Amino acid sequence: MKLKSLILKNFRSYKDVKILFDKSMNVIIGQNDVGKSTILEALDIFFEGGTIKIDMTDFRKNAEDNKIIIGTEFVVDGEKEILIDASNKTKLIDECLLNNDGFLEVLKEFEIKNEKLQKEKVFIKAQYPKEYFNEPLINMKISDLKKKLNEKFNEEEVEDIDKRTNAEIRKALYGKASNEFEEIKIDITKEDAKAVWEQLKKWLP
């Protein structure tokens, strides 16, 4: 994967911006105190480099909502198979985990409550089948996936599906979905999806 862009909202001097990166070399220039170091420090926070820690002083003054967002987009090799759970390798495009532009978009959100910074939540912004909005398949246990499989397929069809792995069941369910897609945010810090984020981090630059 290659870093395509950095998304900042309510982070220090940045209200709401997307910073694009070139695939070869990038140079950040500007006068003092315009936010050059902020870009690098936001990347350090996102990639958990350990040098910079986010705190309440990073929350933009006069922000219109109560969240700091640090996000990234990555160029993904559509044919590359990666491991995103304990089952088997799969493609992010087959898992409906890419955004409208075909990139992997990951957003880290830090909510402010009672003037305190809450624990981060991590979301994937994805073009996703509308019928699975309420229960994104990536967040479901294999037992729940099997139940949904029995709801969507008849007995003969179910017999032809490999029910031993999450990825194969999800693939079958996505194939059965209607062609209605919309971009949504999928929370991958929920208990059943935490392993997905841990695996994805291994593939990030």
Image (cartoon, rainbow, N blue to C red):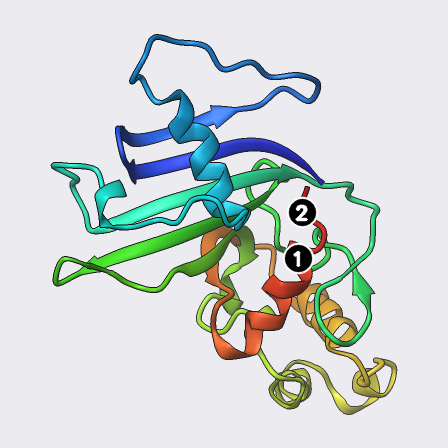
Looking at the picture, how far across and down is residue 97, in whole percent?
A: 61, 54
Name above or below for residue 26 compared with residue 55.
above
Point out residue 105 in the picture as x, y percentages from the top left corner: 54, 45
Q: Residue at x 12, y 63 (%)?
A: 114
Residue at left offset 48%, top offset 61% = 186
Name the side, left or right, on which 42 lies relative to 196.
left
Which residue is disc 1 drawn over?
200
Disc 1 + disc 2, Cβ < 8 Å: yes
Quick check: 89 above or below 25? below
Q: Secondary structure at mark 2?
A: loop
Circle 1 SS class: helix
Q: Is residue 166 above or below residue 28?
A: below
Please indicate whether residue 119 sits to the left or right of residue 134 in the image.
left
Q: Nearer the viewer, residue 123 or 173?
A: 123
Residue at 40% from the left image edge and 21% from the top image edge? 36
**Res. 150 image quadrant:** bottom right
Q: Residues within 10 Å of mark 2 (few under 14, many from 20)?
A: few
Mark 1 to mark 2 CA distance (whole Å)? 7 Å
Total labels: the figure holds: 2
Quarter of the image with the C terminus in it: top right
Q: Position of residue 99 (x, y in %)?
A: 56, 44
Q: What crowding class fits label 1: few (fewer than 14 Cα within 10 Å), some (14-19), or many (20 or more)? A: few
Q: Position of residue 191 (x, y in %)?
A: 51, 78
The quarter in which the N terminus is drawn is: top right
* Amino acid type of the residue that numbered disc 1 sits on in the rendered structure: Leu
Q: Is residue 137 above or below residue 155?
A: above
Q: Give, as a three-letter code, the residue at label 2.
A: Leu
Residue 181: give its label.
Answer: none
Q: Which residue is mark 2?
A: 204
